[in-house]
Amino acid sequence: MNDIAPALVELLEAARMVRERAYCPYSHFAVGAAVRTASGMIFPGCNIENAAYPVTICAERTALYGAYAAGERDIIGLAVIADTPGPVSPCGSCRQVIFELAPRAIVVLANLHGMLRVTFAHELLPDGFDPASLPQVNR
């Protein structure tokens, strides 16, 4: 982990810590995420499951929505960590949300064993759906 910027190491550590708060009694797959905004604020997020599976929310979306709810829209970094064989991979829904809400963010995907991958939203979701994809109505 020493080969990435200290700010990303701090972000990854925040994700690692919040992972411990995940509520995942069904999948037992705890995920932590954290976003950093241009103002320097860090917003943590963990996955929260529900017996009605469709209303479960992933860690990445929890962190991003928290930042947006606080009025922070300029997301510059996102870290995600889980106990996976390699760096954790965001689900398709999270990739879409990252693509729209954090299009310029550096994204660090990691596992608990020190493996990581640094990437960007457009690499996670090439040709993603964005506001330009919508009809020109009311714009």
Image (cartoon, rainbow, N blue to C red):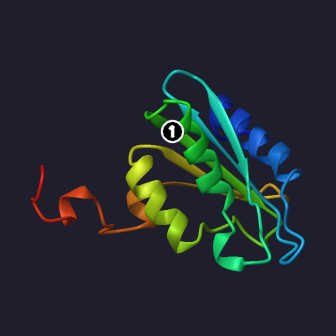
Tell me if I can see residue 1 in this picture.
Answer: no
Instruction: Report which quarter residue 104 is drawn in.
Output: top left
Residues 48 and 95: in front is 48
Quadrant of the frame with the N terminus: top right
Name the spot of residue 29 as percent of width and height, x first.
Answer: 82, 70
Q: Residue at x 33, y 67 (%)?
A: 128
| Residue with the most extreme top position | 39
Q: Is residue 89 above or below residue 137?
A: below
Q: In this view, does 74 lie above or below 57?
A: above
Q: Which residue is drawn at 35% across and 68% down?
A: 126
Q: In this view, does 75 lie above or below 19?
A: above
Image position of 5 (left or right of 93): right
Name the spot of residue 69 as percent of width and height, x first.
Answer: 54, 37
Q: In this view, does 42 lie above or below 30?
A: above
For mark 1, what is the residue? 68
Instruction: Report which quarter residue 10 is drawn in.
Output: top right
Q: Residue at x 66, y 63 (%)?
A: 57
- Per the image, label 1 sits on a secondary structure element best described as helix
Tell me if I can see residue 36 in this picture.
Answer: yes
Q: Which residue is drawn at 82% across and 63% down?
A: 30
Image position of 17 (left or right of 104): right
Residues 48 and 138: in front is 138
Mark 1, Cα crowd under 10 Å, few <14 / some 14-19 / many 20+, is: some
Q: How many labels does the image show?
A: 1
- Which residue type carries mark 1? Tyr
Name the spot of residue 117 as percent of width and height, x first.
Answer: 61, 57
